[in-house]
Image (spheres, rainbow, N blue to C red):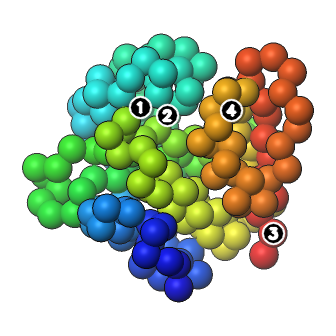
Amino acid sequence: MLSRSRATQARPSEAPISPWVIHTQRSVRTLTSPATPDDIQDANALHARCSLETRFARYGAARRTLSRAEWEHLTNPDRGITWATRPAGDPAEADVVALTHLMHTEDEGVHELALLVDDSWQGQGLGSALARNVLAVARTTSVRELTLLVGSDNRRMQSILRRLGAVLPPARGTTVNIVVPVGT
């Protein structure tokens, strides 16, 4: 069982496709489920609330919105899966506070992981719990490793990835390509 100082999740040893129930360090209950093309306004509202620093950490650019085509790519099951996280309660009323992506790459068995967490929700263990759940999902498939392109100064994400078993290569420039072995 996870300590009270860390975010907890329902059934942490299983690989839940969804929904994921995660309790943050502040004991706020969240619900994560697959995003759909209809969630584009909520996804863009999240982008609008995120600071320039947060958006840059996710994209390597100061993206304010996603186009409909980009969102449809991210929510197309043939290309991967995107999850939207909201505070538990009435999902129609709750803001999206995090997006998690597990997308196919051109390399067999390699998927790209990406997270975007609302600034006011950072530092509560939500990103760590989402990354652990994605790793659990990947373990039930033919995925052998997760890849991420992370800013060399993005210490939070690097810390999350180390806890997932990644060995971080030395930074050469502004980004680091990090591989997380999936294992079984």
Decide which of 24, 80 is in the foreground and name it: 24
The label on residue 85 is none
In screen coordinates, is 11 left or right of 59? left
Of pointers 3 and 4, the one earlier in the residue sequence: 4
26 above or below 75? below
Say what secondary structure mark 1 lies in.
Answer: helix
Of pointers 3 and 2, the one earlier in the residue sequence: 2
The amino acid at mark 1 is: Trp
Distance of label 4 from label 2 (alpha carbons): 21 Å
Say what secondary structure mark 3 lies in.
Answer: loop
At 89% from the left and 32% from the top, the residue drawn is: 170
At 78% from the left and 30% from the top, the residue drawn is: 176
Q: Nearer the viewer, mark 4 or mark 1?
A: 4
Q: Position of residue 23 (x, y in %)?
A: 35, 68
Task: Specify the quadrant of the image occupied by residue 79.
Answer: top right
Say what secondary structure mark 4 lies in.
Answer: strand
Q: Which residue is mark 2?
A: 73
Distance of label 1 from label 3 (alpha carbons): 30 Å
Decide which of 176, 122 is in the foreground and name it: 122
Say what secondary structure mark 2 lies in.
Answer: helix
The label on residue 150 is 4
Q: Nearer the viewer, mark 4 or mark 2?
A: 4
At 62% from the left and 69% from the top, the residue drawn is: 136
Q: Residues within 10 Å of mark 4 (few under 14, many from 20)?
A: many
Contact, mark 2 vs mark 1 (Cβ under 8 Å): yes
Q: Which residue is mark 3?
A: 183
Task: Specify the quadrant of the image occupied by residue 65.
Answer: top left
